[in-house]
Amino acid sequence: MYARETLKRTLERVTGLGRPSAEFAHGAVRGRRPQSFLFADDGTIPNNAKLPLVCYRAAVRLRHSMDPAAVFEELFAQNGWQDSWRDGIYDYVHYHSRTHEVLGFARGHARVKFGGDRGKIVSLRTEDVVILPAGTGHQCLWGSDDLLIVGAYPRGGLYDECAGTTEERASALKSIPEVALPEKDPIYGSQGPLSGLW
């Protein structure tokens, strides 16, 4: 399925067919109050001592006539979150020590564990958005067959993938606090709730 999504995305970008306009994507945004969760270092997964994970429920109205993944891609790009991808979430715990990440649920539903072994299991579904600060452990425990996530990263972040090994820990503990704050909330822009939470 994900290979098909990559091809679909490529065709949309080349032809423009199925791609939402900036106005359409902006009009799909719903005002939502954020949920936030702060996770402590559990000795394996560092998480982020200062920045909470932020979750917006049903934040983007996805219409069936438009590619839902493309709506998220357009919103993220408008707000400076780039290098987007379409896929699922890995079924093993991992984190990024050099960048923050946003996950937009374009289709399906899932149970995702955030924060490592002592973290929190969150049920997420189509139209939800989760913003993970650098260092936050995440792992898909279960996902529907049609699950499709769009992920992206703020400008200036450097993608890496850490699995909680002892070897990477010292370096991760140094790089996580140095990751710059994003300029904008990936959904709500410069006036979004993220600036007050981070």
Image (tube, grey):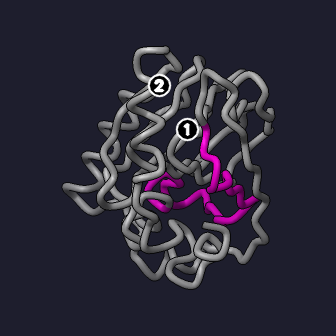
Please give the label number shown on residue 148. 1
Residue 97: horizontal and vertical position, in percent?
43, 38
Q: What secondary structure characterizes most of the magenta part?
A: loop
Instruction: Give the side of residue 14 with respect to residue 136, left or right.
Output: left
Task: State the residue at coordinates (71%, 56%).
Answer: 55
For the residues marked 1 and 2, what is the alpha-carbon distance in whole angstroms?
30 Å
Q: Is residue 103 above or below residue 169?
A: below
68 shown above or below 27: above
Q: Which badge, 1 or 2, is on the more N-terminal residue?
A: 1
Can you say which quadrant of the picture contains the C terminus? bottom right
- The residue at which mark 2 appears reads as 169
Relative to residue 130, is residue 22 drawn left or right?
left
Residue lying at 54% horizontally and 41% vertically, measured from the top left = 149
Q: Amino acid at mark 1?
A: Leu
Q: Is residue 127 visible?
A: no
Range of the magenta residues? 47-71
> Residue at position x 54%, y 60% from top?
65
Q: Quadrant of residue 81?
A: bottom left
Q: Residue furthest left?
A: 14
Of helix, strand and loop, which one carries label 1? strand
